[in-house]
Image: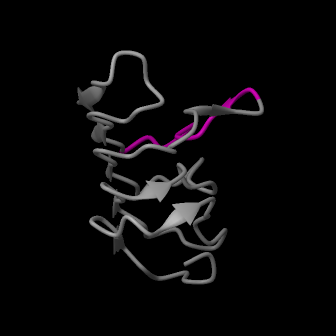
């Protein structure tokens, strides 16, 4: 995935054997949606500044990590982002975080 520069949608959900860190290609300026629910994948890196990015979903994820990495918000300058759905992610003490704009 980290080498795919023209992918617009990434759906990895319902793959509980997927785990660890992953990233979006630096040159991908067309990514729009990611759904990684029901996996143990961490939040992807490389999304900051992606104006095309619209939607991120990760429900029922046990190892998602933090929205702030190294003092930076992972969706920083994703100016078109409309949906962040982190429902029932175990890292979050509230276990419910859904944001629609």
- Relative depth, front residue between 32 and 62: 62
| Residue at (27% x, 40% y) in the render | 83
The residue lying toward the viewer, choosing from 8 and 35, is 35
Does 98 sit left or right of 90 as displayed?
A: left
**Magenta stretch contains residue 19:** no
Q: Residue furthest top?
A: 94
Horizontal side of 36 relative to 48 (left or right) equals left
Check the picture and name the quadrant holding the C terminus.
Answer: top left
Residue 70 at x, y percent in the picture: 77, 33
The x and y percentages for residue 71 are 74, 26
The region drawn magenta spans: 71-80
Q: Residue at x 43, y 24 (%)?
A: 92
Q: Is residue 66 above or below residue 80?
A: above
Quadrant (top left, top right, bottom left, bottom right) of the N terminus: bottom right
Q: Is residue 78 magenta?
A: yes
Q: Main secondary structure of the magenta part?
A: loop
Name the residue located 28 percent from the left edge and 40 percent from the top edge. Answer: 82
For residue 62, above or below residue 12: above
Find residue 76 and report its image quarter: top right
The total number of labels drawn is 0
Q: Nearer the viewer, residue 18 or 54?
A: 18
Give the residue at x 42% y 17%. Answer: 93
Residue 4, x across and y down, in percent: 55, 83
Colour style of the rendered protein structure: one colour
């Amino acid at each position: 995935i980290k080498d795919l520069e023209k992918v617009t949608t990434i759906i990895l959900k319902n793959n509980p054997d997927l785990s660890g860190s992953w990233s979006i290609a630096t040159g991908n300026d067309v990514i729009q949606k990611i759904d990684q629910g029901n996996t143990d994948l961490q939040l992807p890196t490389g999304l900051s500044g992606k104006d095309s990015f619209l939607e991120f979903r990760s429900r029922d994820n046990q190892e998602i990590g933090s929205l702030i990495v190294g003092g930076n918000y992972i969706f920083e300058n994703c100016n078109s982002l409309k949906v962040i759905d982190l429902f029932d992610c175990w890292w979050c003490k509230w276990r419910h975080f859904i944001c629609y704009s």
